[in-house]
Image (cartoon, rainbow, N blue to C red):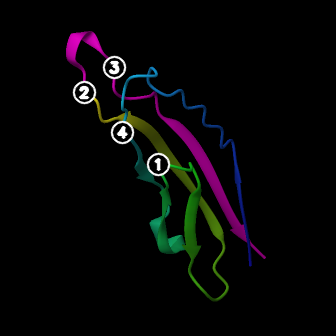
Amino acid sequence: MNASYTNHVISVQSAGPNEVQGLKYVIVNNTNPGLFATQPAINALTGNLTFKVKGGTVTGEAVLTIKLTDLGGTLNGGVNESPTQQLTIRVGS
């Protein structure tokens, strides 16, 4: 069984040199959670996407809607969320 994904582009800019910035990737929506034995997740440190597809002859497509949040908050007019991005995972034989 093969798994592939498209349109996975993430550009992350860190906080200033004297600032600490916690980041968290949030999967806002998954159009086909039944495709996975382990649901997709993104590591905040590496940006790596991990998931496990159900065994057997499972095929299908899942579109993930993802955003990145900065755990620093929104004081002084700050923005702590990125616009959402979509990622498509296709599984087939």
Amino acid under label 2? Gly
Q: Which residue has dot 1 on it?
A: 44
Label 3 secondary element = loop
Secondary structure beneath dot 1 equals loop
x and y percent of residue 6 in the render?
71, 48
Among the two numbered marks 1 and 4 on one chain, the one whose residue lies closer to the N terminus: 4
Q: Mark 1 and 4 residues: CB-CB less than 8 Å, in contact?
A: yes
**Mark 4: amino acid:** Gly
User: In the image, residue 52 lies at what x, y percent?
Assistant: 56, 74
The three-letter amino acid code for the residue at tag 1 is: Ala
Q: Nearer the viewer, mark 1 or mark 3?
A: 1
In this rendering, would 47 be left or right of 39? Answer: right
Answer with mark 4 or mark 3, whichever residue precedes in sequence. 4
Does the magenta portion include 82?
yes
Judged from this view, the residue extending furthest toward the top is 76
Q: Are marks 1 and 3 in contact (CB under 8 Å)?
A: no
Residue behind mark 4: 22
- The residue carrying mark 2 is 73
Position of the N terminus by quadrant: bottom right
